[in-house]
Image: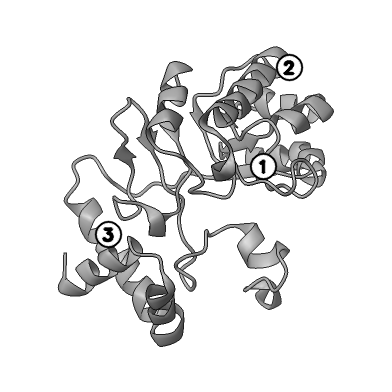
Amino acid sequence: MSWKGKLVAAACRRKGFLTTAIVYGLGGRFFTREFYRAQGEIAAKTPGTGGCISLSFDVDYPEDAESLPEVCEFLDQLGLKASFAVIGRLVEAYPDQHRVVVRAGHEIINHTYSHPANELLHPHEHFDELSAQDQKDQILQCHRVCQDLLGVSPPGFRAPHFGNIQGRLFYETLAGLGYRFSSSLSSAASPAFGLPFSTGHGIWEFPVSCCPRHPFAVLDTWHCFRKQKARHREEG
């Protein structure tokens, strides 16, 4: 890895005021350019890595659930399969829409029972503010709902809002359910610089990609179009 790549890697692991000022105020484009370049250098040295994309959807709101049949139809037209991170309470409220996802052959992953910090389902409390037992209960409740209503056992998990996890006990809970992976970190917060890595509990962590222009933001429709002051709304 180049010295620039090493500098970017170090900055990614230090999320503070100074790093944020450097990234956003003094060279966001330089940062993201070196981020992806360095990530490519790492991948080139990793056996078995090649060009592939993992597509996922977070079903966080009622309108997301209502749109599932349409999304699945569109993916079928493209010949694509995806992962859908589902919330237990929304599966209970919209079981038929979620069953469309299963029948279409897509993957269901656990996204907690009520998605703490979701303003409709579980406001005023973040996932990382819960006790380890309450985190475990959120995961187990969603797991049981998926089994009971969808007839599937999720193979993986995604924490609400990426990165709100509490380390060892969190991964032990996933391992106890037989899960194989988590996708709960952003690339910028990843110790492996955005590449998949083993957590040491039989669980692989697959970080989600960051926005090419805003390296501490996840590349998703929420960042681009849906949130207040979305950064790419004017671009369509």
The x, y position of residue 196, in whole percent, is: 33, 43
In the drawing, what numbered circle is on residue 225?
Answer: none
The x, y position of residue 177, in whole percent, is: 48, 17
First reached walking from the N terminus: tag 2 or tag 1: 1
Q: Determine if residue 107 is in view.
A: no
Report which quarter residue 61 is drawn in. top right
Q: Mark 2: which secondary structure? A: helix
Quadrant showing the C terminus: bottom right
Taking depth in this image into account, of 200 and 75 the one nearest to the observer is: 200
| Residue 112 position (above or below residue 209) | above
Marks 2, 1: nearer the viewer: 1
Colouring scheme applied when the structure was drawn? one colour
Report which quarter residue 111 is drawn in. top right
CA separation, marks 1 and 3? 34 Å
For image coordinates 47% across by 44% down, the residue present is: 54
Q: Mark 1: which secondary structure? A: loop
| Residue 92 position (above or below residue 183) | above
Q: Residues within 10 Å of mark 1 (few under 14, many from 20)?
A: many
CA separation, marks 2 and 1? 22 Å
The x, y position of residue 214, in whole percent, is: 49, 71
Residue position marked by numbered label 2 in the rendering: 149
Residue position marked by numbered label 1 in the rendering: 116
Q: Determine if residue 167 is in view.
A: yes
CA separation, marks 3 and 2? 41 Å
In the rendered structure, which amino acid carries the disc numbered 3? Answer: Gly
In the rendered structure, which amino acid carries the disc numbered 1? Answer: Pro
| Residue 125 position (above or below residue 29) | above
Quadrant showing the N terminus: bottom left
First reached walking from the N terminus: tag 3 or tag 2: 3
In the rendered structure, which amino acid carries the disc numbered 2? Answer: Leu
Residue position marked by numbered label 3 in the rendering: 40
Q: Residues within 10 Å of mark 3 (few under 14, many from 20)?
A: some
